[in-house]
Image: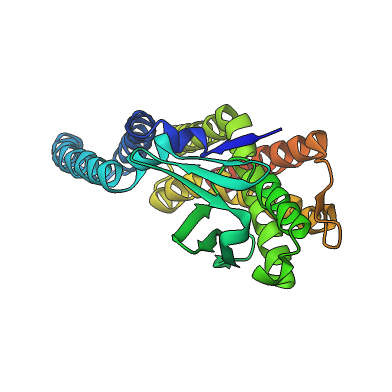
Amino acid sequence: MNHTYVYRKHLRQGFQFMIKFFGVLISMVIILSWGLIFTDEKAIKVVSLLVWGVILIVFSLFMILEFGVIYLVLNRRFKSISVSLTEDAIVYNNSKTQTIVPYEEIEKLEFPSIKYTGGWVKIVHKGGNIRLTVVLENIGDFICELKKKLQEKNMTQVYHEKKFFSFLKTAVFSDESWDRIYCNLKLHLGLFYGCMVMTIVMLKLNEYSSYSKLFILGSLFTPLLGYLLGEIIIGSKVKKRVKEVESIIMPRDRDFEQKVIRLCGIGATFVYLFVILVFVLQ
């Protein structure tokens, strides 16, 4: 049975996703700006608000322009891209053309990537090349299926086994990491907003301004650090699930992943808020 692979939803949505992301970004900037002004006893509130208002407008216009350029130059094309593996060929579709590459015409597979971070697979064939990044949904399954097709055709010489396996681990981790972001998006946003607001409220109620700016900026990065810690812990399990010889990806333990993400994210946030509370009560 043929399987069609497409890019992740945030790339296929294109400009719609960018507007949502822009809204979240601007709301965070507003909260941070408000916190920095109202927890600083020396700030002249009206003047500061006017200055921040002008900066926010300029920043917003710049970001809208930048997102528009990124969408037109890069993201728009992802909406129409799909790739399928049939019995005899790779079928690659984009907004302009359909490219059919028989497996026998594949000359080389290249895997430019940074381990556990990102990269792409480049399928070099007689008529050109196809490049697929790790943001292709289920890219781990894709390259495993492609390898099987090449093995059936006795074409193992077109890829380097160790480089293939290294990229497979990176692709699986990246694909599953994006899936976790989708599943936990509300949790992540809640921690970001909650940590910032609670930090500002505690600092203001206790009239503690000596380290206000540092604490408020830290409230933005603390949930991020918690998320990254969770991903590192989960990532250490990925290499054990990818079997090199068989090119098999063992099933994920989603319950374990959810526990780690929640524990690290919520734990980091509460520890940070507790540290602030200790400082302001001194």
- Nearest the camera: 239 or 200? 239
Residue at 62 percent of width and 55 percent of height:
103
Looking at the image, how many numbered discs can be counted on the residues? 0
| Relative horizontal placement of residue 49, taking residue 136 as reference (left or right) | left
Corner quadrant of residue 252 = top right
In the image, residue 224 lies at what x, y percent? 55, 47
In the image, residue 55 lies at what x, y percent? 17, 43
| Relative horizontal placement of residue 15, taking residue 141 as reference (left or right) | left
Residue at 68 percent of width and 49 percent of height:
140
Using the image, determine if residue 265 lies above or below residue 168.
above
Residue at 33 percent of width and 43 percent of height:
36
Can I make out residue 110 in this image? no
In the image, residue 69 lies at what x, y percent? 23, 45
| Relative horizontal placement of residue 84, taking residue 154 as reference (left or right) | left
Residue at 17 percent of width and 36 percent of height:
53
Using the image, determine if residue 259 lies above or below residue 214.
above
In the image, residue 62 lies at what x, y percent? 19, 45
Q: How is the image coloured?
A: rainbow
| Relative horizontal placement of residue 198, taking residue 65 as reference (left or right) | right
